Amino acid sequence: MKYIIKDTDLRVYKLSESCIFKKNNERHGQLSNMASGFPIKVNNVSIKTTEALYQACRFPHRPDIQAKLINEISPMHVKMLSNSHKIDSRPDWEDVRIKVMKWCVNLKLAQNILSFGEVLNSTGSKYLVENSSKDNFWGAIPDSNNEHYTGQNALGRLLMDLRQKFQGSQWLDLLYVEPPEISNFLLYNDEIKIIDERLNYIKSLVKYWKIEHKIILKHFDEADNKFYNLGLKINGQKGLF
Ligand SMILES: Nc1nc(O)c(N)c(N[C@@H]2O[C@H](COP(=O)(O)O)[C@@H](O)[C@H]2O)n1
């Protein structure tokens, strides 16, 4: 099922059917954009959280603000800092923010495919819902008993969509992340292009195999070379896995 998000779309989620996430250190907290441990690299710039990446995308024409957001350690401070510069947001921000968020969470998975993939898998088929006290756009607001959550839950729905793709047969395609189709998608004045993590994924598997199975190392060395050559050939092309 696809989670197409429309502005008028309020939904009600039952606690018993949902994985509710809020704080990083609570259950399912790793689904939050504020969660650390899922670093991202874009145009060779290291970014600590999806929150920092998402907020930096508000200001493509202000690399100075992007740098402040990216260098900020606390993701909550990132959000507050971004809020303080809201007036400088790209003029079409409201129209493009869902596409940007989708790209951010895709990248979180592509660059942390085993760890974040495990987080997504651990939620089974439950609804994913960001618990927010006041934001019923990205999240959903609990009732007084914390039993029902009402909101558009845009972030949760993007994550459910991502989980569904991750659990499908084409999941390796998620390693090939195309930028959202929007103008001026820039980091530090440089255009953000396709991010292809397929070769890195293969290398990480080969590294894992070498550590875990030293005894059959020579076979994997041979495979490593083959994969590496394959990787060089496939670099930049879609759909070859
Ligand atoms: N931790 C937290 N506190 C809140 O009050 C929130 N609204 C959220 N939601 C997250 O904030 C990001 C969206 O920011 P904008 O409102 O678009 O500036 C996004 O990561 C939501 O998941 N989180």
Image (spheres, rainbow, N blue to C red):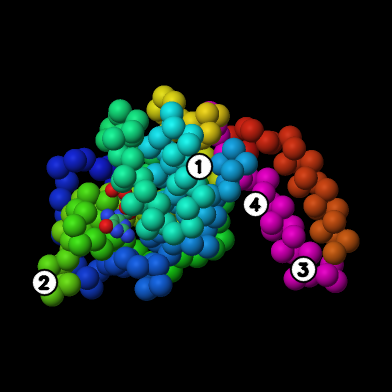
The residues colored magenta run 191-216
Q: Between 225 and 50, which is closer to the camera in this rendering? A: 50
Residue for badge 3: 211
Q: Between 4 and 27, which is closer to the camera in this rendering? A: 27
**What secondary structure predominates along the stretch shown in magenta?**
helix
* Residue 44: % across, % down: 62, 41
Using the numbered discs, state the Cα–Cα distance from disc 4 to disc 1 in whole angstroms: 28 Å
Q: Mark 4 or mark 2, which has the lower sequence index? A: 2
Give the residue type that dot 4 points to.
Answer: Tyr
Using the numbered discs, state the Cα–Cα distance from disc 2 to disc 3 in whole angstroms: 51 Å
Location of residue 197 with respect to 60 vertically, above or below: below
- Examine the structure image and report whether residue 238 is included in the region drawn in magenta: no
Location of residue 76 with respect to 184 vertically, above or below: below
Q: Residue furthest left?
A: 144
Q: Mark 1 or mark 3, which has the lower sequence index? A: 1
Residue for badge 1: 67
Task: Mark 4 and ligand 1: say if the CB distance to the nearest ligand atom is below 8 Å.
Answer: no
Residue for badge 2: 144
Pair 2/1: label in front: 1
Give the residue type that dot 2 points to.
Answer: Ser
Residue for badge 4: 201
Label 3 secondary element: helix
- Examine the structure image and report whether residue 199 is included in the region drawn in magenta: yes
Label 4 secondary element: helix
Q: Mark 3 or mark 4, which has the lower sequence index? A: 4
Find out whether the residues at labels 4 and 1 contact each other: C-beta distance under 8 Å.
no
Q: Mark 2 or mark 3, which has the lower sequence index? A: 2
Q: Mark 2 or mark 1, which has the lower sequence index? A: 1
Give the residue type that dot 1 points to.
Answer: Ala
* Residue 222: % across, % down: 85, 53
